[in-house]
Image (cartoon, rainbow, N blue to C red):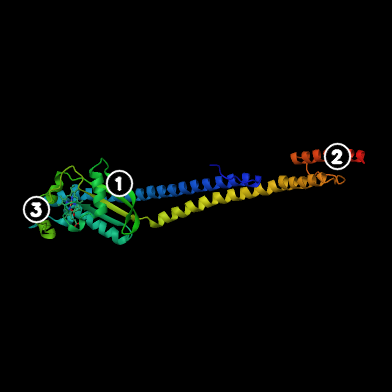
Amino acid sequence: MRLPLPKSIRWKVGLPVILLGTVLGLVVGFYSYQNTIETAKETTKEKIKTAMTFTKASREYVRSTLRPKIDELLASGCSKEDFILEGQSSSFFTASIFKKVSEELPNFSLRQVAFNPLNPKDEPNELEAGVINFMRNSTHREYSDIVNYRGERYFVYASAVVPDGSCLRCHGQVQNMPKVIQALYKPQRDLNWEVGKVQGAVMVFVPFESTVLKAQLTGLYRGLSIFGIFLLLTLFILISLDRLVFKPIERLERKAEEIAKGNVDEPVDITSDDEIGKLAEAFERMRVSIKKVMDLLK
Ligand code: HEC
């Protein structure tokens, strides 16, 4: 089927330019949106990574410095306690840090979650379980994406928790757990985390709704700008064509009608020296010739 093409040159020129403007506007708008989101994702990820590095370093400090020191003190018989949670458990330490950070940055949600958790509050929700399973079933040990969470859009960053042998002291069988841990968390059954397998994740949720909105607005703005430029361009082209081509052609058309009716006395106006001017000159020569013939015939 053929499209009913417009009959006027105005449309034949104007329509493609407007169409091109629309398409370019859409493409630029869409890519600008994508680009803004990607940049925001990268920046957020970098910020989270910096924070995580501090957390990891702190954990490492508890594990490699503080805990052995306290172990040594406990072994030398300076206390009746078998374990000092606050000073020996890097997980407890991280949980405390996360709680503090969450208080400081209420929009940020920091969680360490795992299947078979020691603290029931660390049971992963559906979304978190999905992310853990994704990392478990792939070689990815990190995950980041924009997700819908509690009815809002969030940027989520997850880093896999992969237990080593040392974790089983508290995340293995109940009977091996330090007494304080048994007393505090009252585990109902053995947790039996598997060494070397993704068991959980440290999850960071950052609100992203406003970023997405901003990106949408930027995209819209850029797209509309491009469209606007093309609209102006079309207007400019049409006005120029009107002044330089269409109006003079219409004048010549009227003149031709006049000549056809036999009114050959008025000379043809030649208003320019371009192609249209040359056409007008040709008309004028034709008028003069016709006038000569008509004078002869009189
Ligand atoms: C000395 C005891 C101890 C050891 C060893 C230990 N953790 Fe924990 N872990 C805890 C405690 C206590 C909690 C609960 C913290 C809280 O209240 O949220 C916890 C919680 C966690 C959680 C959150 C899910 C849950 O079970 O509540 C993760 C993840 C975790 N630990 C990872 C590890 C990893 C990985 C290792 C080994 C590298 C490890 N832990 C070794 C004591 C320990």
Which circle, 1 or 2, is nearer the viewer? Answer: 2
Identify which residue is drawn at 22% across, 50% down: 59
Please name the amino acid that badge 1 sits on. Tyr
In front here: 41 or 282? 282
Identify which residue is drawn at 72% across, 48% down: 243
Q: Which residue is mark 3?
A: 174
Label 1 vs 2, first from the N-terminus? 1
Please name the amino acid that badge 2 sits on. Ile
Query: Which x, y percent locates residue 55?
Result: 27, 51
Q: Which residue is mark 1?
A: 143
In front here: 3 or 225? 3
Say which element carries label 1.
strand
Q: Which residue is mark 2?
A: 290
Please name the amino acid that badge 3 sits on. Val
* Gap between marks 1 and 3 measured at Cα: 31 Å
Tell whether 121 sits left or right of 25.
Answer: left
Label 3 vs 2, first from the N-terminus? 3
For the C terminus, give its image quadrant.
top right
